[in-house]
Amino acid sequence: VIMTFNFYETKFGKEMFGEPVDVNKEWDVSEIPRPKYSKDDKVLVFDSDILSYRISASCDNRYVNVFNLDGKKKKFKNRKELNSWAKNNSVDISNFKIEDVVESEPLSYCLNTLKRAINVALKNSGCNKFELYVEGSSNFRQKLPLPEKYKNRDTTYRPTHLKACKEFIVQHLGGYRVGGAETDDFVQTRMYELHKSNVHAVTYNIDKDFLQEWRYDPLVYSPITCEVTQYKGGIGELWLTNNGVKGSGMIWLLQQNLIGDCSDSYSPKIFFNKKYGEKSFYNDFKDVTDYKELFSKYMDLWESLVDDTIEYTDIFGVKQKKTRLEIIELYFSVAYMRISANDETTFKSLLEEYGGLNIDV
């Protein structure tokens, strides 16, 4: 099914979501209306932060201009290419003027590209309905007593039309702003809800966090490959890629809990007493197929890496003193993607349910 969109009104969106939403409202995950589906419907659940970023970034032409001391200009694709050229030619660029340039396509072109991308995703995923969710201004992880700021991206490149794409999704395509949690949390929630309701659901996603789902085998549409892949839930699995270790299921959730995510600026590795990274985790856990073995080895590993008690100052300037298990719980609350507004899953609850271990704080 290929759908076309009017720039100012989306009939399909209104049919699905009822009356147009308040475009400025940030919706709590319990407040967001849930569409009703028939047995023949197939739903594509968009992480629209990913959609918006990919489309808006594709509409930016970025390059670097470099001016030497004589004012002569040379153009490079990016700073990596510039630095490589300087190294290969033994050129000192420390006193050169370096200018980062972004040339953007018109907004109308970008928004039309966004609409086409939704149509392409629907066609390639075999879905006939969709849901769109974008980030709000805050989420619970920002309030956690971490030693480093969560998602510290103050200097990160943001595409020119990123904000406009997200606003367009809310204003004209029936999307919702998620408040109090991150978009990927609510996408995880919706996919689980649809699974429990026996609705065929696929998520538009390239976020590795989503793959921690262990309760079922989720379907993921990749806008990079334009293919749908079903990932292994349950205890899951680990695999090596050119970009490092990837995985799915419970074992992947525990890996994220232990190793963290540098792209989101969190990792308990600052408390480790020796070096340990994702490749080591892969080698240690890739052949584990039993939950009790998994959690037993996992706790032994934490005991070898982190002292019984940790002291640090959090991002709010408060001095913290935590046990090893409290540190695990702190980073679990960052890594874990919630499946409901009142999801009370903790590391300790998984440890008891799946690992058969009861450890006091």
Image: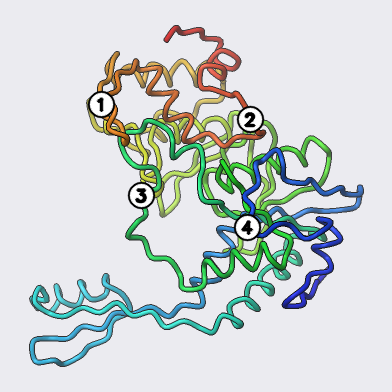
Element under disc 3:
loop
Q: CA distance from mark 2 to mark 4?
A: 39 Å
Q: Nearer the viewer, residue 108 or 191?
A: 108
Q: CA distance from mark 2 to mark 3?
A: 32 Å
**Between discs 2 and 3, the one toward the N terminus:** 3
Q: CA distance from mark 1 to mark 4?
A: 38 Å
Residue drawn at (25%, 26%) of the image: 312
Q: CA distance from mark 1 to mark 3?
A: 19 Å
Element under disc 4:
loop
Which mark is nearer the camera, 2 or 3?
Answer: 3
Q: Are marks 1 and 2 in contact (CB under 8 Å)?
A: no
Reading the image, the residue beneath label 1 is 312
Which mark is nearer the camera, 1 or 2?
Answer: 1
Q: Are marks 2 and 4 in contact (CB under 8 Å)?
A: no
Reading the image, the residue beneath label 4 is 24
What's the mark number on residue 234? 2
Q: CA distance from mark 4 to mark 3?
A: 25 Å
Q: Amino acid at mark 1?
A: Tyr
Q: Are marks 1 and 3 in contact (CB under 8 Å)?
A: no
Reading the image, the residue beneath label 3 is 152
**Between discs 1 and 2, the one toward the N terminus:** 2
